[in-house]
Amino acid sequence: MIRHLILEDGTTFEGLGFGAPATTFGEIIFHTAMTGYQEIITDPIYDGQMIVFSMPVVGAAGIHAEAYESVKPMIRGMIVHDLAEVSVNRQRRMNLDRFLKQHNIPGLYQVDTRKLIRHLRETGPQKATIVDYADDHAVDQLVATVLTNKQVQNTATSKPYANPGRGRHIVVIDFGLKHGILRMLGDYDANVSVLPYTTSVDEVLTLDPDGVILSTGPGDPRSLPESVLTLIRVLQTKTPLLGIGLGHELFALANDATLVPLPSEHHGMNHPIQEIISKQIFYAMQGQGYAVDETLLDRKKLFVTYRDLVDGAVQGLRHRDYPAFSVQFFPDAAPGPYEATAVFADFFETVEDYVEHHS
Amino acid sequence: MSNITVKNILFIGAGSNDFGLEAEHDAAIYQVMPELKGHGINVFLIDENPYALSLESLAAEAIWQPLTVENIKHVIKNNHIDTVLPLFGGTRAVRLWATTVQQWEHGDGPVPRTLGLSIDMLLRVNNLPNLTRYMADAGLPVLTSHVVKAQDDANELLRELQIPLMIRSLHPKTTNTRQMVERLDEFEEAIDYAKKQSMTQEIIISKAINGLKEVSMEILRDFRGNKMKIGASEDMDPIGIHTADSLSVAPTLTIQDQVLEKMRTYAFQVADLLGLQGIMHVQFAFDDSTGAIYIIKVSPYVDQMASRMALVTGYPVMLVAINLAMGIALEDIVLPHDFGEKTAMMEPMMDHVAVKLPIFPFGELEESDVSVNRQLNSIQKSVGSTIGFGRTFIEALEKAIRSAHFNNATFSPTNMAHISDDALIQQLIHPEDNRVLLLIEAIKRGYEIDELAELTNIDEFYFYQLGHLLQLELKVENDADSIESLRLGKQFGLSDGLIALFWNTNFTNIRSLSKEHQIEATYKALEPSAGEFPENARQYYSTFEEENESVQVSDNTVMVIGSGAFRLGDAASGGYATTIVLSELRRLQYHTIIMNNNANDATLMQNLADKQYLEPLEISDVMKVVELENPVAIIVPGNRRKLITALRELDQNVLILPKEKHMPSGPVDDRTEFALNIFSDGQQIYPVNMTQHVAGELRIISQIIELPKQLAQTHLENPGVYQVIWYENGHDWVDHVEISDISYDTWLRPMPFGQVAFISKVMQVQWVRITVRALLGRLTEQDQKLLENVNKLTLQTDVSLVAADVNYDLHLQPIEPIDGTRFELGVNIQYYDQK
């Protein structure tokens, strides 16, 4: 069935509907990854967004049990050029089309995605809607729609839960956690407690963690309550701390950094990221709309550890006084290159050091 | 920026063309030599292939000699070579350089430095068991072979490796002792047999990987250890069919991210292990059911995958690779201005699909009554390939098939209707070159997709896709004159010609119907950022979408039609000629456009033409581009007669590069072929020289010839190099031929491009360039003077063109031996003693 994508600037695209026949609104962004569509559409960081894939054929790798980044995808729409109907599920039922149907998410295919991406590259992300008819009514609806800025509330857990292991005790503060982080912690046999971001300092410290991770998450970190920054300011003095994605941005804000929206967002896995101290270049999954303004950094507190060599965007920070550091990219490699997982090795090394010196 | 100082560098070429050796190395060397010369390095090149373009490059001192250890040593000594770069010449150059180093003697002086890999690693790469052990010791998942003698040991291996197993004899008495063991009860019998066939009663057991998925990955590494992935492709055909004979798809479509990232990690580990500075191709086998990955081949040098990845991603693979080999860090590489500033460091992303289709020599052989084994297996049978580009797999596949120039009827859905069910099943299990049609036929007959996937070990995705194609073709066929079907058909890559065939009309009608309903091709730029950044793209492919990105280059362009895939008989010489044409057009200050579809052909190197259209070369494809670019002239190889006629009917200014359809490359039996070679500038004919061709060897006769009276009055309107041919009995080399009367049993033909390449090098006269100038009416006074005296040039006549020693028996398993002098695949040169 022919359906339409309408952008806030009035541009429309025609395609064929797949997934759910729903009408949705969201912020539209484009993604250049060639693999990992299932991980991407289930990553809570994309809550409330519509994703255009530059990869021309999507769906041919099926839907896999081990490729969920959250149980329920939070995207508002998926726009691709060509849709493949392959199932690798042992029940032989689940493919991308059915998966989106099940979660009431509309998809659009046979879209000139290259034209759309070249357009979005110029305009930046904007509001968009997927509808049956591209009429004035639909445009009015889109213009009138105010998109939520409560993505973290939407996706993060409201109750603590455990992911037990026999190793170090790691507290994860959940801002919209993706499974990849838990998977990585599992590799280190960590004993994990996942806490809501509304947790108090006392609640964390009572659990006596060996380290704390500020998780990834969706949306603008500046829309979160001040209490989150206070929590981080205390925790970083008490225990090794690693911030990832949104967690990195919050860690920066807690230490007086300034965030700026990126002129062109990073959604992909092909940008060279350089570790400044070693000059080593590696690649990692990125999903980033904001960046730390390096010029306004309080250098007495933080220094830059990683940089994106394409546009110079800060990719990592470290605190001068505490065993606390953060990365903007996603080191859990779900999806994405494995090189980046070295960040977790760093973190656990820091944890071991800390435990050794503080027990 | 480089951390090494080089004064005199030697490139080792790849030698003659062969199965799996087309023009990719020559093109790579041709591209990178100016890069070094630009840095003040003296560049030397040794190669023997008469078709080598790089031997005519101004960026290097070219040494045209057979590739032997002795010659390489001489070149090194005579030119004070301090650095050798074998990696661009591929496996043959690497092997040759390794041998040279091993045979290095005290008196040879210091061993020059090898770039890209240390000598130690080079020797290891050249010794497969050694390399495999080295990787296994590093914990990499390689397939190891175990040699056993006792049944107990064999049983233990059975437990460890699990079936399926490959069992063969060590030191076998017969040639092929390979057995696949797929069931436990076959094991003991297979062991017994292999033992009996072994002269030492020893057997080799390894894990069998037939039927697994094959994935190729191309990566780069710099001296600091920074690594990046250029791209990956998956073979539709499972392991068991040589990757060159497989239909390959880039990017990978059916492989999950996690699996691909594991392969990436392994490939990076191999690069670190080898200390690579440059480029590497790693081949993997992937077991979909267990998730197991095996490294099956490591090629730390330029090969066809490298040139294919350059073409399909738009990433400047060769330029970056030479920088890395020269010890420049990834982040310090400066690219020519038409690439994005950060392009070298960004892993290329694709927003299109590229399908590589192998081209087999079976048709040419059949025409000459040579029967061969057409069943595809682990030994390469294809001699070339085409690539189709599109926005879907089907569109790319259709375009690859059309690029192969099959007759439309060959790919009509009804073509396989005659095959019996039994034969169909047999061929599904033991595929031949026509398997794509066969798969479609099987779907048509109602076989379930999961059955077919199990039978063929081809991913279900491809059956779904082929099923779509079948439905699409049926819809178009049954829905004549429907605009909707026309739109759909074009979106999926069907040509005007094929749709015309379905609808019993001609392509002109389809073309005007499409125009009338605005079903027009749009061209998408092929660039490595997948739309993320603006790039000054030079490469375009067509599709049917909303936005067209290609704008006319200028009002002074000449468009050149490439010769597509390499085939038996044509070999690489077509690519040689087209490339020189492009180079000459640029020198004459035309803007240039090339249309072609062969990744291993030099015409598609990144900086040769102002614009590339990666397209099939049928009339409808060519006309679409012509309408957009409005070239002042179109240069077409003379064997494309239908295309030439069609273009002329559409009032295009067609210039013909004289060429005939392929022919047996030389005389058979006890006969000599004489050729009186002439050049026509369109007005006048000039005598050039005489050549003699005996049993696969061609020599220039050292005789100054004048034009026989029959030719003096002939007018050859189309400029070019021609020859008058005749045969005589006997095979003795002569130094004089009587040519005053050549009116009996002779015929005139365009000189084959291969011979043009050869005599151009021997005579130091650029015949292709002169032909281009003549075609465009741009011959200079100097040219005229040269032509008037060209028959009197003093020539080096101790060098002959010889058919390369191609192992047809191994590759094609012919019923009777193939006479290599009749079917040219590659050529060499040979120096002979003059009488």
Image: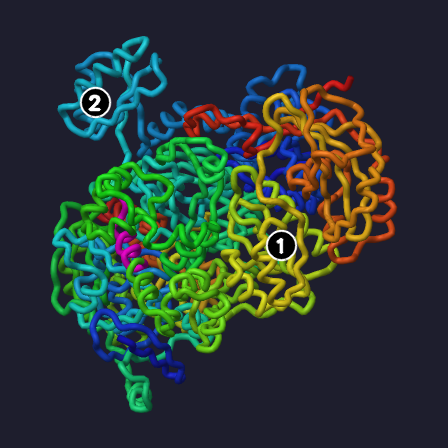
Residues B660 and A21: in front is B660
Q: Is residue B291 left or right of residue B412?
A: left
- Residue A184 position, x and y percent, is 24, 51
Packing grade of label 1 (10 A; few <14, some 14-19, many >=20) is many
Chain letter for mark 1, please.
B
Q: Is residue A256 visible?
A: no
Crowdedness near tag 2: few (<14), some (14–19) or many (≥20) residues, C-alpha within 10 Å = some
CB within 8 Å, label 1 to label 2: no
Query: Residue visible at 17% across and 46% down?
Result: A167
Q: Which residue is mark 1?
A: B636
Chain letter of the residue beneath label 2 in the structure image: B
Q: Which residues are magenta?
A: B458-469
Residue A130 vs residue A243, the one in the foreground? A130
* Amino acid residing under circle 1: Val
**Quadrant assignment, res B349:** bottom left
> Is A243 drawn above or below residue B732 in the view shown?
below
Where residue B240 sits, quadrant-wise, is top left
